[in-house]
Image (tube, rainbow, N blue to C red):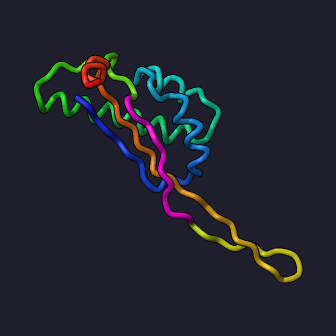
Amino acid sequence: MEAKAQARFVRVTPQKARRVVDLIRGKQASEAVAVLKFAPQAASEPVRKVVESAVANARVKADRASERFDESDYFVAEAYVDEGPTLKRFRPRAQGRASRILKRTSHITVVVAPREQKEGAR
């Protein structure tokens, strides 16, 4: 049973978050959490939380459907980062000028699925 989790408006640039998401795409869910726990990038914490949330969502869906749930069966089927709204700020510069600072945000989405379900769908 496929489960999805999303974190929206995360104050991490999409480019930096995509570097972290590329580390876990296709990995087993528990392995992905372990990799993210020790990754030095700042974006790894929100991505780890989204992966853990997706696994928890899968557990709840399995309980509702009265199905067996084993976390080791699940892997990261999809993981992607979309760009959120950009906060525009201004900073003083030399000779009375101002320059624009772009504070970018991200929408992080992770989908986990059991291994046999994804292979059977192909």
Q: Is residue 71 left or right of residue 69?
A: right
Q: Is residue 107 left or right of residue 88?
A: left
The location of residue 90, given as percent across then percent down, is: 69, 74
Magenta span of residues = 77-86
Q: Is residue 29 left or right of residue 86?
A: left
Q: Is residue 55 above or below residue 92?
A: above
Prevalent SS, magenta region:
strand
* Residue at figure coordinates x 77%, y 77% from the top left: 98
Instruction: Report if residue 80 lies within the magenta region.
Output: yes
Instruction: Report if residue 35 lies within the magenta region.
Output: no
The location of residue 108, given as percent across then percent down, is: 45, 45
Quarter of the image that includes the C terminus: top left
Q: Nearer the viewer, residue 26 or 64?
A: 26
Q: Is residue 12 left or right of residue 63?
A: right
Q: Nearer the viewer, residue 71 or 26?
A: 26
* Residue at figure coordinates x 65%, y 71% from the top left: 89
The location of residue 38, given as percent across then percent down, is: 59, 26
* Residue at figure coordinates x 31%, y 39% from the top left: 4
Q: Is residue 15 above or below residue 79?
A: below
* Residue at figure coordinates x 87%, y 76% from the top left: 94
